Image (spheres, grey):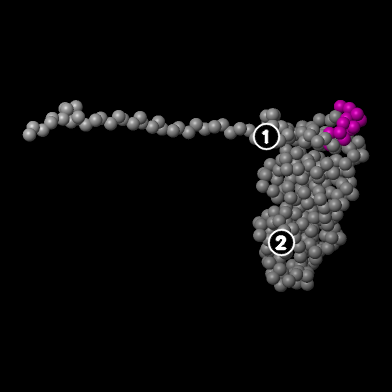
Amino acid sequence: MAMALRPIDNALPVPTPERPKKQAKVAVPVPKQPEFSANDENKAPKMAETVDYVASESLKPILDPDSKIQSLIEGLDSKDWTKVCEALNDARRFALYHSDLLILLLEKVMLVLVKAMKNPRSALCKTSIMASSDIFNAFGDKLLELLTSEAFDQLLLLKASQDKRFVCEEADRALNIMVGSLTPLPLLQKLRGYVKHANLRVRAKAAVSISNCVSKMGLEGMKDYGLVSLVQMAADLLNDRLPEAREAARSVLVSVHKAFTENEEQKQEAWQNFCQSNLSPIHVQSVVKFTIS
């Protein structure tokens, strides 16, 4: 029996249609939208405002100080930090050239300085520190009556101990001017508590300021404060963890040793007896070895 032949077109394989190639996905970065607070959702964020840091020698006298003193009060009370900065610079000009007018507002100005130093905005903080330097220079010991609280001294020490270098350096300058402008004994009494501060840097900055105070004192001034207290304080700081504090302690001991032995015939023997009477054996060894060598 003859077999039926299949049509020839059925004998060839049916071509499979090609799948369309997938297009590679390309990630297109979407620009981040600015974040707004709930109160200004339709406003663009403001650009950072800048403040000029004017050196004391570049500040000019005020043309009409009697009328300007009223606007100074308004500026110090402003909610706008840039206006407070302007007012603080005006306060500096008053301190340098019209201190007789500023002294009437000095307590108010000092309160604003303390508040501004606590402000997290670095520009306001630095401006307030610069203002404090000019006020120290202008008023000296008159400020001691206004510095009854420890807030101002502590703030300067804290600012000199922080990480923002341009604020830290300005606070260091202010501390040096404070020491140079005020009578050593009352200032030393205000600073003494900070050498036991928990913050290492605050301890070191306090030690440096104390050292600078002691270097200005004679033997009688040291005795008024307490020779034993001074030497014990310095002996403790010789073992501080920061080199700055240790160096300040050595400076205090050099000043005390020089004043103590100036009129003594048996200088080293008298100094050694003094140390042995007032210090622990370990401290005697380090203090005598350092000061006599």
**Towards the viewer: 167 or 262:** 167
For image coordinates 82% across by 55% down, the residue present is 190
215 is higher (above) or lower (below) than 37:
below
Q: Quadrant of residue 289?
A: bottom right
Residue 4, image x, y percentages: 12, 31
> Which callout, 1 or 2, points at the residue further toward the start of the chain?
1
Q: Is the N terminus in the top left, top right, bottom left or bottom right quadrant? A: top left
Question: At 33% from the left edge and 31% from the top edge, which residue is drawn?
Answer: 19
Residue 171, percent from left and from top: 74, 45
User: Residue 162 at x, y = what percent?
Assistant: 69, 48
Please provide percent x and percent y for residue 143. 87, 46
The secondary structure type at the circle numbered 2 is helix
Place residue 85 in its image quadrant. Answer: top right
- What SS does tag 1 mark? loop
Q: Which residues are magenta?
A: 63-76
Check disc 2 and give the amino acid type.
Leu
Q: Label 1 belongs to which residue?
A: 36
Distance in Å between CA atoms under marks 1 and 2 = 51 Å
Q: Badge 2 local density, few (<14 within 10 Å), some, or many (20+)?
A: many
Q: Main secondary structure of the magenta part?
A: helix
Total numbered badges shown on the rendered structure:
2
The mark found on residue 237 in the picture is: 2
Depicted 217 relative to depicted 97: above or below: below
Q: Residue, x 77% and y 45% (percent of image)?
A: 118
- The label number, if any, that marks residue 116 in the structure image: none
